[in-house]
Structure formats: structure tokens, C-alpha cells
Image: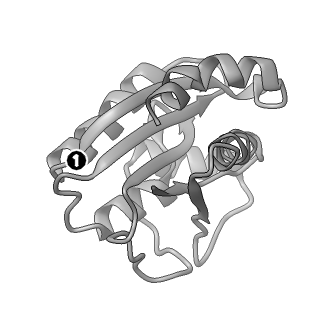
Amino acid sequence: MKIAILFYSFSGNTKKACEFLKNRLSSKSIGVDLIELKLKEETASFLRQCLQAFLKKKPDLAEGGYNLEKYDCLIFSSPVWAFAIAPALRSCLVRIETLEKKRTVCFLTYGSGAGSGKALKELESIILDKGAQIIFSKNIAGNKTKDNTYLEKQFKPLLDIL
């Protein structure tokens, strides 16, 4: 099995969760590629990033399209900002024409938790509209991404499936 984890991380919390998941999957002899989404022109202002998320902006990514055909499962992750997914993940998803019959996973990291349910439902909707099957979906507290025991508990259902 080959898995790609496509993610955006501003503060590093989402990246920590993705790296944890990659390490756990790799320990099960599953091939995992981390694909960190980067914007061509990224503002250092968290408030500006949140505004772009709220307005559902789709800024240009630093890299072009991604060849996702070789993966059996795709994992999409970003922080929750202003009740929405990060603009970089939105831009990535717009570029993907189809996810027909692809197994997918969604997980978002959040700070306050406000809007995390709405953001996760939006991400699920985008992925389902592209024809994918969602096998796992979860919101994860961003301030607990350094706690491996917490992450193990959150990802256990997914690890049991894969």
C-alpha cells in the first residue's frame, strides 16, 4: 500500500500530527509520502491567512499539480481557520480533477475548536464531490500534537483500518 499525506501547516501543529501519522504507518510497512503544500506568496500574517480562509480564497501553490494516481490512499490535512480549511489545501483540492474511487482520510487541527466541525464537513464535501470514499475523518486539538499518547488515541481507528 502507498499513501500520500497532503497537508499545510502554518504554526507546525498540523505538520507534527502528519509526521506522527507517517511514522506510525511506516512502522506497519506502509509506504508514505509527506507532501507539504506551500504557497507561491505566503503572508506571515496569521490574521490575513484567516481572512483568506474565511473568504475561501485559492492562492497559487509553489508547486504545480501532483501525481496522485500512484497512491492507494490520500490523506488531506490542514488547520482550521475562520471556520474553514487553510487556503493552501483549498487550492490543492481545486487542482485535483477527480478522486474517483480513491480511499481518502481527512483530519484537521484546531485551536479553539470553534468552526472545526463546519470546516471538516466542508472538506468532506469537497472530497466526496470528486468521487472519493472517506474512510476516516477527525478533528484534532492543535495544542496536543506534541502528545504522542493523545495522537495515538486519535488515530487508532485509522491505524486499525490500514
- Asked if residue 116 shows in the view, the reply is yes
Residue under circle 1? 132
Which residue occupies 37% across, 57% down? 72
Is the N terminus in the top left, top right, bottom left or bottom right quadrant? bottom left
Q: Position of residue 16 (x, y in %)?
A: 76, 43
Left or right, 135 with reference to 8? left
Which residue occupies 38% across, 71% down? 70
Relative vertical location of residue 2 with respect to residue 16 in this rendering, above or below: below
Q: Position of residue 127 (x, y in %)?
A: 27, 46
Q: Nearer the viewer, residue 86 or 101?
A: 101
Q: Nearer the viewer, residue 6 or 74?
A: 74
Q: Callout 1: few (<14), some (14-19), or many (20+) C-alpha neighbours within 10 Å? A: many
Q: Position of residue 89 (x, y in %)?
A: 46, 55
Q: Position of residue 32 (x, y in %)?
A: 58, 58
Relative vertical location of residue 68 with respect to residue 123 in this rendering, above or below: below
Secondary structure under the numbered disc 1 in the rendered image: loop
Q: Nearer the viewer, residue 75 or 23?
A: 23
Relative vertical location of residue 101 with respect to residue 58 in this rendering, above or below: above
- Asked if residue 57 shows in the view, the reply is no
Which residue occupies 44% across, 42% down? 54
Amino acid under disc 1? Ala
**Residue 123 sits in quarter:** top left
